[in-house]
Amino acid sequence: MKLFHINRDLSEKNNHRTEAYRNGMTRKIALCGMMTALAMIFGYIEAILPISLGIPGVKLGMANIVIVISLYMLPFSNTMCIQIARIVLTSFLFGNLSVMLYSLAGGLLSLVVMGLLKRLDCFSVNGVSIAGGVSHNIGQLMVAVIVVNNLNIVTYLPVLLVSGLITGFVIGIIASRFRPYYSK
């Protein structure tokens, strides 16, 4: 009879663990979905509002606020999924294949750089975001050199580096304001 009670107790413990795991996974999936939707909304707002920073091709990149926050709230793999889903969906809805190509190059390079710097744990959220802004522009410039097949386009690099630094700084300030909520 005691053996039956032990098995039943173990079974109940396993059910609670499975339920806790499912609740954690459900929460994570829901959070990823919400972050993807929020990034897409920011991308849409930026696409319809004529916000010009005075330099052709330069924009704030409001969707990156969500990506930086996700990088600190979720595992890297989840943030990568959010980034890819955001870029692909936003490109299909509001852009074209060319937009997707440039966005994937910049977005994935910036996310990898930000992920590595975050992992080193020697940069603030702001520093990580600045590196992301700069590397995003470098990734897009690399694609432009390949697509246009002209190395002279690299002369635009200083402008892109400065704009990446400024926009990364602004995105970092905004994302760091949410830092108290990262673990909740």
Image (cartoon, rainbow, N blue to C red):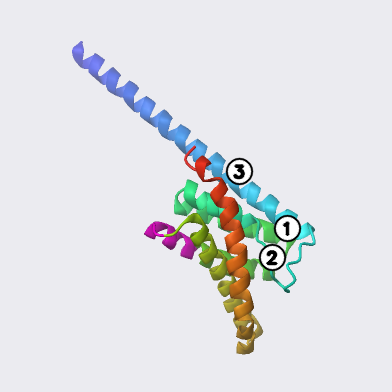
Vertical position of residue 78 compared to residue 28: above or below: below
Q: Is 14 one of the magenta-colored residues?
A: no
What amino acid type should be assigned to the residue bearing mark 3?
Met
Span highlighted in magenta in the image: 112-122
Check if mark 1's residue and mark 2's residue have beta carbons within 8 Å: yes
Q: Looking at the image, can residue 108 be seen? A: no
Residue at the location (64% across, 77% down)? 159
Q: Is residue 144 above or below residue 116?
A: below
Q: Gap between marks 3 and 2, in whole Å?
A: 23 Å
Mark 2 is on which residue type?
Lys
Please name the residue that numbered disc 2 is placed on.
59
Q: Give the Cα distance between marks 1 and 3.
A: 18 Å
Callout 1, which amino acid? Glu
**Is residue 120 one of those drawn in magenta?**
yes
Q: In front of the other: label 1 or label 3?
A: 1
Mark 1 and mark 2: span between their CA atoms? Answer: 8 Å
Q: Position of residue 28 (x, y in %)?
A: 50, 41
Direction from residue 16 to residue 33 in the image, left or right = right
Task: Point out the tag, 3 or 2, that comes first from the N-terminus.
Answer: 3
Residue at the image position 41 percent from the left and 34 percent from the top? 21
Label for residue 113? none
Task: Residue 135: tell me if it is visible.
Answer: yes
Specify few, some or many for label 1: CA neighbours under 10 Å numbering under 14, 14-19, or 20 or more: some
Residue under circle 1? Answer: 46
Nearest to the observer: residue 28 or residue 96: 28
Q: Which mark is residue 34?
A: 3
Q: Residues within 10 Å of mark 2 (few under 14, many from 20)?
A: some
Contact, mark 1 vs mark 3 (Cβ under 8 Å): no
